[in-house]
């Protein structure tokens, strides 16, 4: 899932300072799961902004609404009336949702209310770990399902580096050495000999290189 956290209230207040009518728009997907931008957070943010502005002597008319997904145009239509009535929209979706809103509602500005952080998995309640950088060239079949690009502090394709101790990265004792985990799984599946194969330098061209990426599936394209 895409993981993020809400921007500080002071930062949002500064961004909406010129406006009198604000819509806080939540998203029902990833940011709901990571408890950063769902319906509950949208309502809480709306209330907090209203109280803060009232105390500052600059009353604000603020409403909240949540759509199923902000990254697809079809789901944004349910919010059309509220968007058109507002002076500005504050999106609690990821950066993709903010950009989709600005494309769909070209005559209305949508501001980010969330800092998009990474793609990751929930480890425990309130804790998420980055698992994928979206590099465009997955090597998980070679590394036993553990990503060395996202989870190794050096993004090494040929590891381990020798700097780890007791299974922890030399960068921090709080970081598991990705290659230690990879080697353990290789041993479990009797594939340790794979370490003898030297991997060539990673091809980064499918990654964020030369502008925004686009994926086209001809089998589902209309």
Image: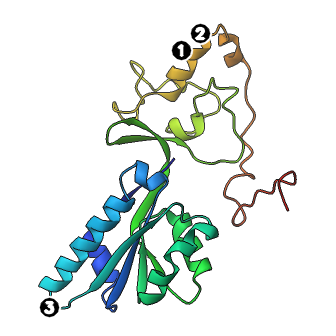
SS category of the residue bearing label 3:
loop
Counting from the top left corner in percent of width and height, residue 190 is at 65, 7
Please rate how many residues cluster around mark 1, counting C-alpha atoms within 10 Å: few if below 14, some from 14 to 19, many from 20: some
Residue depicted at 49% across the width and 38% down the height: 153
Counting from the top left corner in percent of width and height, residue 49 is at 24, 76
Mark-to-mark CA distance, 1 and 3: 61 Å
Q: Nearer the viewer, mark 3 or mark 2?
A: 3
Residue depicted at 69% across the width and 38% down the height: 138
Residue depicted at 56% across the width and 90% down the height: 107
SS category of the residue bearing label 1:
helix
Q: Which residue is mark 1?
A: 184
Q: Which residue is mark 2?
A: 187
Please rate how many residues cluster around mark 3, counting C-alpha atoms within 10 Å: few if below 14, some from 14 to 19, many from 20: few
The image's mark for residue 57 is: 3
Looking at the image, can residue 99 be seen?
Answer: no
Please rate how many residues cluster around mark 2, counting C-alpha atoms within 10 Å: few if below 14, some from 14 to 19, many from 20: few
SS category of the residue bearing label 2:
helix
Tell me which numbered mark, 3 or 2, is placed earlier along the sequence. Answer: 3
Looking at the image, can residue 140 be seen?
Answer: yes
Q: Give the quarter of the figure containing the C terminus.
A: bottom right
Mark-to-mark CA distance, 3 and 2: 66 Å
Asked if marks 3 and 2 touch (Cβ < 8 Å), the reply is no
- Say which of 90 and 134 sits in front: 90
Counting from the top left corner in percent of width and height, residue 78 is at 53, 73
- Say which of 88 and 63 sits in front: 63
């Amino acid at each position: 899932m895409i993981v993020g956290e809400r921007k500080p209230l002071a930062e949002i207040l500064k961004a909406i300072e010129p406006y009198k009518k604000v819509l806080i728009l939540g998203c029902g997907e990833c940011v709901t799961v990571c408890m950063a931008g769902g319906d509950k957070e949208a309502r809480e943010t709306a209330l907090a902004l209203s109280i803060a502005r009232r105390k500052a002597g600059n009353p604000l008319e603020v409403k909240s609404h949540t759509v199923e997904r902000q990254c697809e145009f079809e789901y944004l239509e349910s919010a059309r009336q509220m968007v058109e009535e507002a002076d500005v929209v504050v999106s609690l979706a990821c950066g993709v949702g903010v950009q989709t809103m600005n494309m769909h509602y070209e005559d209305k500005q949508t501001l980010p209310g969330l800092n998009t952080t990474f793609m990751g998995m929930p480890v425990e309640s309130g804790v998420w770990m980055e698992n994928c950088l979206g590099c465009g060239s997955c090597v998980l079949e070679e590394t036993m399902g553990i990503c060395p690009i996202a989870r190794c502090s050096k993004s090494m394709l040929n590891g381990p580096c020798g700097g780890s101790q007791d299974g922890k990265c030399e960068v921090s004792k709080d970081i598991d050495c990705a290659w230690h985990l990879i080697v353990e799984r290789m041993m479990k599946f009797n594939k340790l000999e794979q370490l003898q194969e030297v991997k060539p330098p990673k091809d980064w061209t499918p990654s964020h290189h030369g502008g925004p990426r686009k994926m086209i599936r001809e089998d589902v394209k209309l």
